[in-house]
Image (cartoon, grey):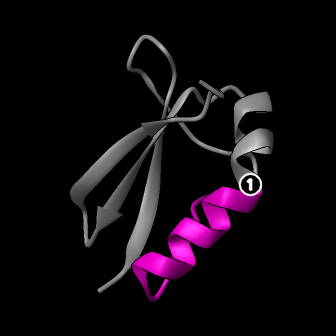
């Protein structure tokens, strides 16, 4: 299993972070990384992130503080 994040703007268009796509060996590693990186992703233009497991969407979350 490979976990990745997909990033979207508010209008639903996809966006890629400047550093490229990160891959993670576990869901926990992916979630820890997004917890540390969400502010930079937001600054780079992403509004939402979807966690993918081998390309299958697990969930989507907003990067904006609620």
Tell whether 38 sits left or right of 1. Answer: right
User: Could you say which quadrant of the image residue 57 lies in?
Assistant: bottom left
Q: Is residue 57 magenta?
A: no
Q: Residue furthest top?
A: 11
Query: Which residue: 71% across, 32% down?
Result: 42
Which residue is more in the foreground, 36 or 4?
A: 36
Residue 14 x, y percent position in the rendering = 45, 31
Residue 11 vertical placement versus 62 (above, below): above
Where the C terminus falls, by quadrant? top right
Query: Which residue: 67% across, 45% down?
Result: 17
Which residue is more in the foreground, 66 or 52?
A: 66
Tell whether 14 sits left or right of 52. Answer: right
Q: Tell me how many marks there are.
A: 1
Residue 40 vertical placement versus 14 (above, below): below
Query: Which residue: 25% across, 72% down?
Result: 54
Tell whether 9 sits left or right of 40. Answer: left
Query: Which residue: 75% across, 60% down?
Result: 36
Instruction: Please rate how many residues cluster around mark 1, counting C-alpha atoms within 10 Å: few if below 14, some from 14 to 19, many from 20.
Output: few
Residue range of the region highlighted in magenta in the rendering = 20-36
Q: Secondary structure at mark 1?
A: helix
User: Where does label 1 land, which residue?
Assistant: 37
Q: Residue furthest front?
A: 66
Q: Is residue 34 magenta?
A: yes
Residue 65 vertical placement versus 40 (above, below): above
Tell whether 6 sits left or right of 55. Answer: right
Residue 3 vertical placement versus 1 (above, below): above
Residue 1 x, y percent position in the rendering = 29, 86
Which residue is more in the foreground, 29 or 55?
A: 29
Residue 11 x, y percent position in the rendering = 42, 11
């Amino acid at each position: 299993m490979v976990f990745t994040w997909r990033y979207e703007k508010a209008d639903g268009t996809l966006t890629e972070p400047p550093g490229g796509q990160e891959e993670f060996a576990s869901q926990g590693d992916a979630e820890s990384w997004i917890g540390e990186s969400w502010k930079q992703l937001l600054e780079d233009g992403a509004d939402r992130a979807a966690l993918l497991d081998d390309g299958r969407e697990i969930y989507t979350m907003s990067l904006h503080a609620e």
